[in-house]
Image (cartoon, rainbow, N blue to C red):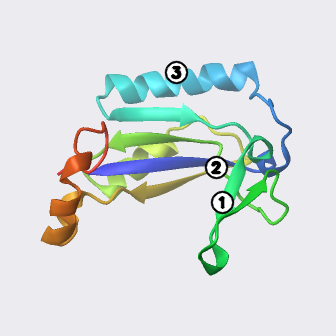
Amino acid sequence: MRFMMIMMPKGYEKAAPGTMPDPKAVAKMMKYNEELQKAGVLLELNGLHPPSAGARVSFAGGVPKVTDGPFAESKEVIGGYWMIQARSREEAIEWAKRCPASENETIEIRQVHEISEFPQEAEESAKSLRHIPGTLQH
């Protein structure tokens, strides 16, 4: 099973474009990332620029509308994520608990839908996407 562990740092919703994490925190996180890699569970990971450097596209009435960040209504935002392969939700939780996160950070754990969970028609229509790494796995 694949799980996404989503890092949500408090205050990141107000961070200026170009804001970078503390180098000491990054060093601790890199050691954790190495643990995930050595254990063979790490599939992918990335940090994200703050919302102030992003944009949202909404579709009210079916019409795309672009809103540049920052987003005033945001209370929790994603700062980064890990994609891991674990035997169970409990194993994914155990990995998240080992993260050297600070008291202002939360990790949300979400299982990734596998294409085999969907009806056969959906699996057939998604065959053309199978060449994209990390997507639509069985």
N-terminal label among 3 and 1? 3
Task: Find residue 78 and name its label.
Answer: 2
Q: Amino acid at mark 3?
A: Lys
Q: Residue at x 22, y 67 (%)?
A: 122
Q: Residue at x 80, y 45 (%)?
A: 52
Nearer to us in this view, 111 or 122 = 122
Q: Amino acid at mark 2?
A: Ile
**Label 3 Cα crowd, 10 Å radius (few <14 / some 14-19 / many 20+):** few
N-terminal label among 1 and 2? 1
Task: Find residue 31 and name its label.
Answer: 3
Residue 73, how many percent across, how many down?
Answer: 81, 66
Real-space CA distance between mark 1 and mark 2, rounded to the nearest whole angstrom: 17 Å
Q: Which residue is mark 1?
A: 57
| Left or right side of 33 for 38 | left
Real-space CA distance between mark 2 and mark 3, rounded to the nearest whole angstrom: 21 Å
Q: Nearer the viewer, mark 3 or mark 1?
A: 1
Q: Residue at x 30, y 39 (%)?
A: 132
**Label 1 Cα crowd, 10 Å radius (few <14 / some 14-19 / many 20+):** few
